[in-house]
Image (cartoon, rainbow, N blue to C red):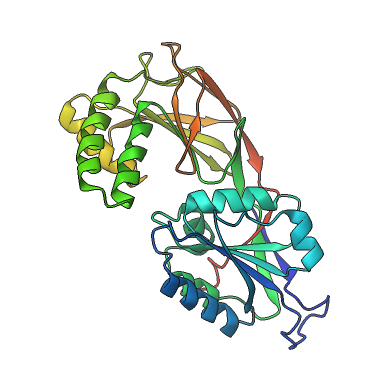
Amino acid sequence: MQGTRAVLAGFGGMIGDSDTSSRRCWLICNAASGSNDDAAVAEVAAALAEAGFPPERTFRFPDEPSPAPEALAAAGVDLLVVFGGDGTTHSVVESAVGWDGPLLVLPGGTMNMLAKRLHGDVAATDVVGRLAPGRLRTTRPPVIATRHGMALTGVLAGPGTVWNEVREAMRAANVLGVVATTREAIAWSVKGPKVVCAEVDCGREDGYAAITVTPNPTGLEANGYYADTLGDFAGQGIALLNRDFRDGPHDELGKHTRLRLVCPDGEPMGLLIDGEPFEGGTEEQFHPATLEVDLVTTIDES
């Protein structure tokens, strides 16, 4: 994570002002996320009010679009809060680029990878309880620049991305869909067009079922995931479902200031950015970048 800085939070430039009436907070939530029902949203709203940031407006994403920088500035919003999963957070943060206010990411989805980077593995209400009166500590973390936009937490490329369809069937509680998509995912992981890291000394020449790219302060870290048996692919699929690849069989593909992934078969590659599907090409390039939005961090304040 990049260095943090403190920003004023609704005090009109007055440090230590106890008047909270001018703090304007907008809350964005997504009912389709993992832990984002009406009761959970009400609990988060109550915690924000207790912290001095009562939500003035609540947006139900994606039915209501995330507010643009111009709308946030015109309304004088002091704190924008997103309570959803990594996909929702991706959309909200990308929409906020160009706004100079602080954005608070709360864990309200399945994996909450960005929220964990910013706050640790804690509940949304616990994060809100850490907000310091008068000041919010913010950071602009490293991200990945892609032709599809930014990746806040990482990219997954290759036929292994098909396991996202299994996750969607599980989210919809579609038992028959889970069975069917799991069978198809295993087969496609085995037979689908592999992806190769095109940089020097970058792993297996025949490619991988999945390559992950994650941002860090020193560049882009790449790992290639493979399996040699159907059982391995089934186990790898569970890891892909959880976006937890550490225990799967893989090669470390190094850290890079530029990364090019290629599908040698000439087929469009499967592509997930922050856990959401995108239309991959036969070649994709990635570069490190710094996020141009101030994200609230509390990880050192617990």
Residue 92 pos. (x, y %): 61, 53
Q: Is residue 96 left or right of residue 240?
A: right
Q: Looking at the image, which residue sits at the far top?
A: 265
* Residue 100 visible in the shown view: no
The relative height of residue 120 versus residue 154 in the rendered view (above or below) is: below
Q: Residue at x 43, y 64 (%)?
A: 36
Q: Can residue 218 be seen from the camera position used here?
A: yes
Quadrant in the rendering for residue 187: top left
Q: Residue furthest right?
A: 13
Q: Is residue 139 left or right of residue 261?
A: right
280, 111: nearer the viewer: 280
Of 131 and 241, which appears nearest the observer?
A: 241
Residue ID at (47%, 30%): 254
Task: Name the residue: 55% across, 55% down.
Answer: 63
Does 258 sit above or below residue 96?
above
Q: Is residue 48 above or below residue 230?
A: below
Q: Please state the horizontal and vertical placement of residue 118, each as a whole percent of the image.
A: 54, 60
Work out whether residue 74 or residue 49 is closer to the camera in this orientation and state it: 74
Which residue occupies the extreme front position in the image? 63
Left or right of 248 on screen, residue 78: right
Q: Image check: 64 left or right of 235?
A: right
- Nearer to us in this view, 114 or 247: 114
| Displayed quadrant of residue 218 | top right
Q: How many marks?
A: 0
Image position, residue 46 (x, y; %) = 53, 81
